[in-house]
Amino acid sequence: MKRSFLVFTLVFCVLSLGAAPAAVQTPAQNQPQAQNDHKAAKPKTAAKGYSFAEELIDLPIKPFEIQKLSDSELISINPQALKAYENAAALENNPNVFENPNAVGKAWTEVAKITVNNPFLNTANSRIEEWKKVIEIFKAHKDNVDKIKTLLASSILTNEQKKGVLLKHLDDFGITFGTQEIFDLTKNTNGFDTVLKGTDFQAKIKDIKRARCEKKSGRDCFECGRNYTDVAYEKLTFFTKACDMKYQPGCEEVNKIKAEQEAEKARIAAEERRKAEEFATKSYNLTEEPIDLIKPFVLGTVNEQDVLNASPAVLKKFEAAVAKEKEKESIKTPGAMTVMWEEIAKITDKNPFQQIAQARGAQWRECAEKMERHENSTNQIRKNIPENTVSLEQKIYLTLKHLDEYGLIFGALEVANAVTYSNEIANYDAVKTKIKDVRLQRCNLNSASDCHTFAMNHAVNEFDKKAYLKKACDLGRMEACSGQPAPVVAAPAPAQQPVTQQAAEPEKKEPEKKAEPTEEDKFKKELWDAGKRTRIAVATTTLVAGVVAGVLGGVSLYGASKYKKDRDKWGHYYEQSETQEDMDKYRKKTTDAHNKMNKYNTLGGVGLGLGAALIATGITFYCIEFKGEKEVRKKYNVSFGASPFDGTLQFAINW
């Protein structure tokens, strides 16, 4: 029964909204119906009294919430009070409610007039007081804006005085009403560009925007990230706040920054992989056999039980590394040896060789670093010796410094070759003495080639010469056994050759009779005739074409980045547009820049892809031999591997 009575009461209240009882009608309600309806609708269509450039913040009014009624209040409610309340609630829920606060105040006043059976009376009185405060703030703000317009138009006040008025206005109203209205007021005022760019004015704007951002203004968070910080993580923080507040430009910036971060991570990872691959595959060309560059590998504590305890995979890798250590040419690829041992050291399960692999990997990495430094120093010597802008003293200093640091390990022949055509350095006593000392020290460390070279070029008499030739022969230098001359540096050009007996001596030692072609010379010639010349030409042409295509692709991507900046710039202007004409203009410019960016991105991608493909093809032609070349190798018993890098390495060794 109670539920039925409540339903009946609610139906009665709804019906009573369309036709109120005559006993409670006001004189205005006794007028004709059309006239009465027009007056009832008037608060909703009243002229707007205020307009705002930005979202309002920190107004002295609580968010409006629909009041919940109890069963007893529903039964006894005055229908006219409910109707007035609904009208006030509709105005409160209007997104543009602050543009006409007087209408809302009047609506709540109508609710408060009904004192009998009106459960909304307290709410109405509370909202009336709150809206009065809002209206007072709006009126003060509007009066201040009108005053500023007059002051800005004044020809008596200076720009500094006008700026002071603006700063005072921002102090009083900036947090609530934002800063855009100030820029709107001053954009047509002559001479204000420099004022608005001043540090004190910009500092005020920055403080206001940051304060509004903290008070949940998405647009101000976006502006802080875009214009008021140069710190990357702060930008991301502000844009993230703006996105969390449903401000879409902030979300777009967050996505763009994260995409750039991911791209940077990918680039760094790719660069690290490239460096690791370059380290693992780099081969060094050594003019002489190095001494004490790395200690010979000794199995040491490895015993039969360790071998039995090792997993098959670990044992296979260990045996491969040990076998590679025994190869004489392994010293030319220290990166490859480092990787082999470090891969073994990474295995923790059933790996009794882990400590050995860690130690040996560290030794090979140190060896690779020494060879890298030696190669850089050698390149510096070769670059600076012929350079006229480098003084003689500096050239001699670099030469002696290189021999002091690397001579004992890597020999002196490369330096002798580098200084041959610089007569001043080649005949400088300190350089000649240092080269002689290096060769003697290396001979004493059982370097056969250095004993041979020292005997032929530096022995003071025939007795010493024969003694060092014998030592070289005993160490396995066949040329020394027969008394043949040691390899010497190329003779200087005729115009630069000094007229001294010392410089002429190597010429006297060379045999006058032209030597017969060696097996190596025959091998080279047949290899070229078998197709290597054509293959190298094709590979070189393809590589050059690939580089050109890649450069064009890079230029296109650079153009795309330029149009991307234009798109972002026009897009920003589009966001700030105030008229439909500006919106259409900047939308068109944004679209044009975006289309050009996509076009150049496509051309850049195609160029880079084509360039990479051509470069890969050229490298393949460099590495893979023709059938005729392989037959020549078999003829001269020169092996080749399936791997391009192994084949290239073996080719270099045997050539």
Image (cartoon, rainbow, N blue to C red):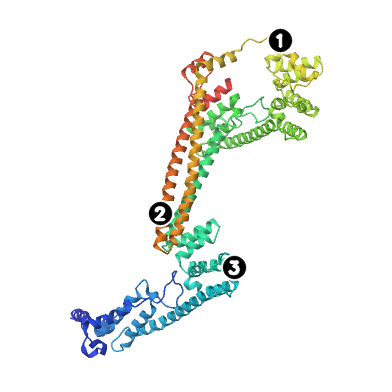
Q: Earlier in the sequence, mark 3 or mark 1?
A: 3
The residue at the point 46 percent across, 41 percent down is 604
The residue where tag 2 is placed is: 588
Vertical position of residue 487 compared to residue 645: above or below: above
For label 1, count other residues whose C-alpha is less than 10 Å away and answer few (under 14), some (14-19) or many (20+): few
Q: Is residue 373 above or below residue 628?
A: below
**Circle 1: residue type:** Glu
Label at residue 200? 3
Q: Quadrant of the N terminus?
A: bottom left
Does label 1 or label 2 sit earlier along the sequence?
A: 1
Which is in the foreground here, disc 1 or disc 2? 2
The residue under label 1 is 512
What is the spatial separation of the Cα atoms under label 1 and label 2, in whole angstroms? 83 Å
Provide the secondary structure element on which disc 3 rests: helix
Question: Label 1's element?
Answer: loop
> Which of 24 and 464 lies nearest the eye of the viewer?
24
Q: What amino acid is labelled 3 in the image? A: Asp
- At horizontal 42% and vertical 73% (from top left) the residue drawn is 51
Left or right: 119 in relation to 613? left
Of 349 and 479, the residue lying toward us? 479
- Give percent across and percent down for residue 600: 45, 43
Q: CB under 8 Å between callouts 1 and 2?
A: no
Q: Quadrant of residue 4?
A: bottom left
- Residue 455 lies in what quarter of the image? top right
User: In which quadrant of the rendered image does the C terminus lie?
Assistant: top right
As drawn, is 425 to the left or to the right of 591?
A: right
